[in-house]
Image: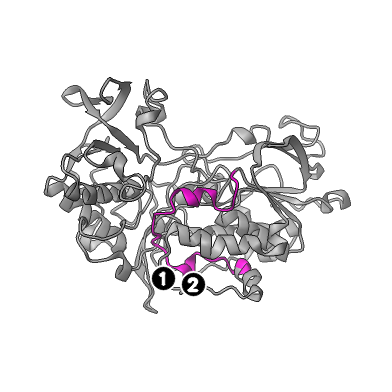
C-alpha cells in the first residue's frame, strides 16, 4: 500500500466496484462505512447475476459465513430478518434472502448500475508505460451499456467481477481443443441443473463429465439420480489423471473435512456400482460434431480414442479475464494469476482450503495504487476461495483506500481450524467462479463444509442418504478434491 497523499480532486471522486455479487455488494457496504462513495457496475440486469445461474445449488457454508458484517449493519434497521445461522442456503435463497434485500437499501440501490459492462480500466490520459504522476491521476473506467459507451473517472477500483464467465478450456495444456467452439451446442455450463429444469437434456442420453473437482463430483452424483429413474442414461467421467482413482475421491471417512469426504464416498460408490464409468488417462485432443452427437477424441496410453456423446459437461475450473486490465500495472503470480503476494498462499500445488490464511489490502495491492482484485477473481486460477475471506478482503481494502492503514492491516476474520473453503460463484459482472468448500465442525458445534458459494456443508443437512436416493439435488463443491491437507503436492501419487 502506497503512502502517496491523495489530492483534493481525487478525494471527491467515487470508488468503482466491478460486479454486484456478494463481494461487490459487500465492498459497497464497507466503502460507505468509510465515508466513501461507491459506484457499482454490473454486467447483468440484477444483483447476483451469476448466483442466479446456479440457483439450484445448495451451499456448503451455513448462513453465518455468507453474510458480511457491514451488510448486516445496513440491513438490520430495515426490519430484515436474518436467516438461521446454521442453515445451508441454496443459491436462490442467497439472492432472495440476502442480496436482493441488501440491494434495496437506499444507499446501496443508489450505487448500482445494471447492464453495464466494464470493458477497460486505465489512468486518465496515460497508458501503463507512463510513470510521472501516476499515483495521483484518476482511474478511467470505460463502461458499455444500452445507452452507449461512457468513461467514468474514479479514485480507486475494486474488481469483484469473478471468473464465472471464463471457464477453462477442454483441451490439453490450457488450450481449447480443436473444434471446441463449433461444439458449443453440445456443451453445458459448469453446473447444469441436472435434476431440475435441464433434466430432459440428460435423461436417457450419453453424458460425459470432464474434470476431477467438486463440481464434477456433484454433477456426477446428480446424474446418478437421473440414471436411476431414466433407463438408457449413460454417465462417463473423463479425467486426465492416470493410475489409481483414489486421489479423485479425497480422504473419504478419514477426511478431516466431513462434507468433502462424504462427497468422495458417494462418488466412489457410483463408480464401483457401475452407474458411472470412470475413464482415466483421457486428454481431449479434438471435438467433432456428427449427425448423431459429439465425437470426443482423446489421447490415451493405448493411442487415440473417440467416444460419442450427447452432452458434455465441462467441470474444468475457471480463470480470470485480465483483458480489461491491460493498461494497468499489475503484479501477478506467474502460476495462478493472483496478486503476487497472494499466489504462494493459495497455489493448489501446496494448499487446500484450510491452509489459506486471511489476508487484506497489503497482500492484494498492485503497482497501480488503489487498484485491487477482490473476491474470486483475486484467486486467479486457484479454486479455494472462501466467501467470508472475500468479505474480509474488501473490509481491509476499503479501509486502505480511506487512508486508515492501521484498520486495513488489522485482520478480523476468524474461521474454523480447517477453514470453510468455497468459490465465489456469485460475485460479479464477469461473474465469478464457483466456490469450493471444506467442511468441519467447530468446537461450538457448528458444522461447516465445502460448497458452491461459501462452501461449508453441515453434516446434518449434507445428508446420510445414498447418492441416488436423495429427493433433491446434492450440495455442490467446486474446486479440486485435495484429499490431503496441503494441496496436490501432498498426494504421493501426484
Q: Main secondary structure of the magenta part?
A: loop
Front residue of this view, candidates 375 and 63? 63
Q: Is residue 433 left or right of residue 327?
A: left
Q: Find disc 2 in the rendering and name its residue.
A: 83
Residues marked 1 and 2 touching at CB (< 8 Å): yes
Q: Position of residue 414 (x, y in %)?
A: 50, 69
Residue 45's label in the rendered image is none
Asked whether residue 398 appears in the rendered view, the answer is yes
> The C terminus is located in which quarter?
top left
Q: Find disc 1 in the rendering and name its residue.
A: 87
Asked whether residue 210 appears in the rendered view, the answer is no
How crowded pointer 1 is (Cα within 10 Å; few <14, some 14-19, many 20+) is rated as: some
What colour-coding does the image apply? one colour
In the image as oriented, which residue stretches furthest toward the bottom?
A: 444
Give the distance between the C-alpha atoms of the residues marked 1 and 2, in whole angstroms. 7 Å
Residue 51 within the segment the image draws in magenta: yes
Secondary element type, mark 2: loop
Residue 262 within the segment the image draws in magenta: no
In the depicted structure, whether residue 304 falls above or below residue 343: above
Query: In percent of the image, x 77 and y 51: which residue is there?
Result: 14
Q: Position of residue 163 (x, y in %)?
A: 50, 43
Front residue of this view, candidates 328 and 79? 79
Q: How many marks?
A: 2
In the image as oriented, which residue stretches furthest toward the right?
A: 8
How crowded pointer 2 is (Cα within 10 Å; few <14, some 14-19, many 20+) is rated as: some
Q: Is residue 204 left or right of residue 360?
A: left
The magenta stretch spans which residues?
A: 44-71
Query: In percent of the image, x 23 and y 27: which residue is there?
Result: 308
Query: In percent of the image, x 19 and y 50: which residue is there?
Result: 229
**Picture quadrant of residue 105:** bottom right
Secondary element type, mark 1: loop
**Picture quadrant of residue 477:** bottom left
Amino acid at each position: 500500500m502506497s503512502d502517496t497523499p491523495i489530492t483534493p480532486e481525487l478525494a471527491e471522486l467515487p470508488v468503482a466496484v466491478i460486479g454486484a455479487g456478494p463481494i461487490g455488494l459487500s465492498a459497497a457496504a464497507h466503502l460507505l462505512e468509510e465515508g466513501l462513495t461507491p459506484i457499482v457496475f454490473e454486467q447483468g440486469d440484477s444483483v447476483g447475476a451469476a448466483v442466479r445461474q446456479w440457483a439450484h445449488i445448495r451451499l456448503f457454508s451455513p448462513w453465518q459465513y455468507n453474510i458480511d458484517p457491514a451488510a448486516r449493519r445496513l440491513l438490520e434497521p430495515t426490519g430484515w430478518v436474518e436467516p438461521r445461522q446454521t442453515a445451508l442456503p441454496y443459491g436462490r435463497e442467497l439472492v432472495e434472502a440476502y442480496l436482493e434485500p441488501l440491494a434495496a437499501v437506499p444507499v446501496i440501490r443508489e450505487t448500482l448500475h445494471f447492464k453495464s459492462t466494464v470493458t477497460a480500466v486505465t489512468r486518465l490520459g496515460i497508458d501503463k508505460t507512463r510513470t510521472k504522476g501516476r499515483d495521483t491521476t484518476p482511474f478511467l473506467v470505460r463502461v458499455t451499456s444500452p445507452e452507449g459507451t461512457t468513461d467514468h473517472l474514479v479514485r480507486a477500483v475494486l474488481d469483484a467481477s469473478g471468473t464465472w464467465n471464463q471457464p477453462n478450456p477442454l483441451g490439453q495444456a490450457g488450450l481449447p481443443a480443436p473444434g471446441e467452439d463449433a461444439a458449443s451446442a453440445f456443451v453445458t455450463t459448469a453446473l447444469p441443473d441436472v435434476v431440475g429444469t435441464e433434466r430432459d437434456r440428460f435423461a436417457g442420453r450419453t453424458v460425459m463429465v470432464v474434470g476431477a473437482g467438486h463440481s464434477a463430483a456433484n454433477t456426477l452424483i446428480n446424474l446418478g439420480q437421473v440414471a436411476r429413474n431414466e433407463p438408457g442414461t449413460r454417465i462417463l467421467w473423463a479425467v486426465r489423471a492416470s493410475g489409481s482413482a483414489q486421489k479423485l475421491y479425497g480422504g473419504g471417512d478419514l477426511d478431516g473435512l466431513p462434507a468433502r469426504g462424504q462427497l468422495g464416498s458417494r462418488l466412489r460408490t457410483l463408480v464401483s456400482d457401475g452407474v458411472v464409468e470412470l475413464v482415466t488417462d483421457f486428454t481431449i485432443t479434438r471435438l467433432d460434431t456428427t449427425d448423431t452427437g459429439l465425437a470426443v477424441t482423446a489421447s490415451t496410453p493405448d493411442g487415440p480414442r473417440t467416444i460419442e456423446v450427447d452432452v458434455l459437461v465441462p467441470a474444468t475450473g475457471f480463470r480470470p479475464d485480465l483483458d480489461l486490465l491491460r493498461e494497468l500495472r499489475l503484479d501477478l503470480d506467474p502460476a495462478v494469476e493472483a496478486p503476487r503476494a497472494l499466489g504462494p498462499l493459495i497455489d493448489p500445488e501446496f494448499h487446500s482450503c484450510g491452509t489459506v490464511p486471511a489476508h487484506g489490502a497489503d497482500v492484494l495491492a498492485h503497482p497501480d495504487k488503489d487498484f485491487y482484485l477482490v473476491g474470486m477473481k483475486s484467486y486467479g486460477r486457484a479454486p479455494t476461495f472462501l466467501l467470508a475471506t472475500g468479505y474480509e478482503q474488501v473490509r481491509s481494502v476499503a479501509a486502505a483506500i480511506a487512508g486508515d492503514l492501521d484498520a486495513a492491516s488489522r485482520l478480523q476474520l476468524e474461521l474454523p481450524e480447517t477453514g470453510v473453503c468455497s468459490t465465489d460463484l456469485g460475485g460479479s459482472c464477469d461473474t465469478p467462479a464457483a466456490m469450493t468448500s471444506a467442511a468441519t465442525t467447530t468446537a461450538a458445534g457448528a458444522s461447516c463444509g465445502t460448497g458452491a458459494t461459501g462452501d461449508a456443508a453441515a453434516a446434518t443437512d449434507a445428508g446420510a442418504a445414498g447418492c441416488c436416493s436423495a429427493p433433491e439435488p446434492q450440495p455442490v463443491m467446486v474446486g479440486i478434491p485435495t484429499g490431503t491437507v496441503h494441496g496436490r503436492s501432498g498426494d504421493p501419487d501426484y
